[in-house]
Image (tube, rainbow, N blue to C red):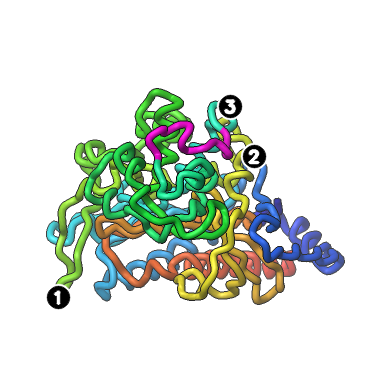
Amino acid sequence: MKKLLAIATPSMLLFALLLSFVSAKQPEEKQQTIAKQVNHVQFPQPQPPEVHFTDLYKKRLEDAIQEYFNKAVDKNQIVGASVSIVKCDSIIYSGGFGNKNAALKDTVNDNTIFRIGSVSKGFAGILTGIHVQDGLINWQDKIIDHIPNFRLANKTQAQKVTLSHVLSHTSGLPYHSFTNLVEDGLSLTTIAGRFNEVLPLQEPGNFYNYQNAIFALSGEVIERVTGKSIKEVIQDRIFSPLQMETASASYEALEQSDNVAMPHQRIRRGWRPTRINKKYYNAVAAGGINASAIDMGKWMKFLLGNNPEVLMSGAMQEVFNPIVQVGGRRNYYQRWPGYKASFYGLGWRVHEFKDIETDEVNKVIHHGGGVNNYRSEIAIYPNEDLGICVLFNSPNKMAKDCIPKIREIIKEALDFDHKNYVAESLVIL
């Protein structure tokens, strides 16, 4: 995986410039149109511990990020936000903007905790991969073997639904089946026994339809094979090893924190803080995780190939590999610059984007989330060793394109830094 370092000696820069003229352009991967034949996602291996970025680059990046978010706060487009950016094995930026509570005018920082909604699904995919690696479960395990009261209207199809199907939204059920029961607070065991009230549309594995209720059964399976609650397992296998000190998976943990961004609703002249509700804490795998930007930075460092002691690279590739194609052109991420195609892996969206300047096709590992008037976005760019996460405490339009805009800010800051060093090197020579 290529590394783009933001600091070098003049001689190293001159060598890099000369090398760039003679390097042959690598052939692009050809995208397969059938979901099961798409190319595997390649992502970084563990990297050396030291990657440097110049003070000039950090300052320019910080100024640009602050301008972008402060403008949104000043225009009342958002209440508060927290951002984390990871490059290679380093968190190169983390910070907060706006207010935790619009009525109190208390400031968001990078340790302020937000609910992350469906960005939790990425944790579920990784957590399942950890237990597959341990040999406790298999991607092809039947849900009914772990949850015997699981039912579908078609008994034959009920025998076919696997862990892979629920994590990739390919169970064959209609869109958002029984999300209402999750939001009503029913237990997953109860919901599992009621899917026979819903008529499947197709055989499992044939097509994509986004789910919350049946997706959350992946967490129920992990609880049953470990004998522990899902919040305990996530703490033991992900939060603690990655030193994610503010992250949690319960309403009670959020209630006990003294640095929480409150959710907000839009009112005529601004924003009104609302109460944190308990929705999705009965379905943690689908949307029940709380975290700060600094902890999401640690999470992205792991996703970029560090911390193999938590999950080996081969097992992580299984989580990120595309399983089913996501059609249409109406989703917000399908309007990002250079968009080509989307797939869903195991708790993650996998997109293909064509670089306008190089014509290279790059894959992006992504997910968005929204719950209780919180909004969140996370994206991993494996080819660039880059991760971006943004957390909001209000619904807003900004979330739909904040990822590509922040990526462009990062690129512009890095390009400026490189041009500055090249100019200084030429003067020295």
Which stretch is magenta? 138-150
Return the disc, 1 or 3, that comes first in the chain's sequence. 3
User: Residue lying farthest top?
Assistant: 227
Which numbered disc, 3 or 2, marks the residue closer to the eye?
Answer: 3
Return the disc, 3 or 2, that comes first in the chain's sequence. 3
Query: What's the magenta bit mostly, secondary-structure-wise?
Result: loop
In whole angstroms, how far apart are the C-alphas of marks 1 and 3? Answer: 55 Å
Judge whether 348 appears above or below 306 on screen. Answer: below
Q: Which residue is mark 3?
A: 135
Q: Which residue is mark 2?
A: 313
Badge 3 crowding class, 10 Å Cα cut-off, few under 14, some 14 to 19, many 20 or more, is: few
**Which residue shows up at 30% across the image and 50% down it?**
114
Determine whether, in the image, residue 59 is placed left or right of residue 138. left
The percent position of residue 72, horizontal first and vertical second, equals 32, 71
The percent position of residue 297, horizontal first and vertical second, equals 46, 47
In whole angstroms, how far apart are the C-alphas of marks 1 and 2? Answer: 49 Å
**Which residue shows up at 18% across the image and 57% down it?**
101
Front one among 39 and 243: 39
Badge 2 crowding class, 10 Å Cα cut-off, few under 14, some 14 to 19, many 20 or more, is: many
Quarter of the figure with residue 32: bottom right
Q: Quadrant of the C terminus?
A: bottom right
Secondary structure under badge 2?
Answer: helix
Secondary structure under badge 1?
Answer: loop
Q: Which residue is mark 1?
A: 269
Return the disc, 1 or 2, that comes first in the chain's sequence. 1
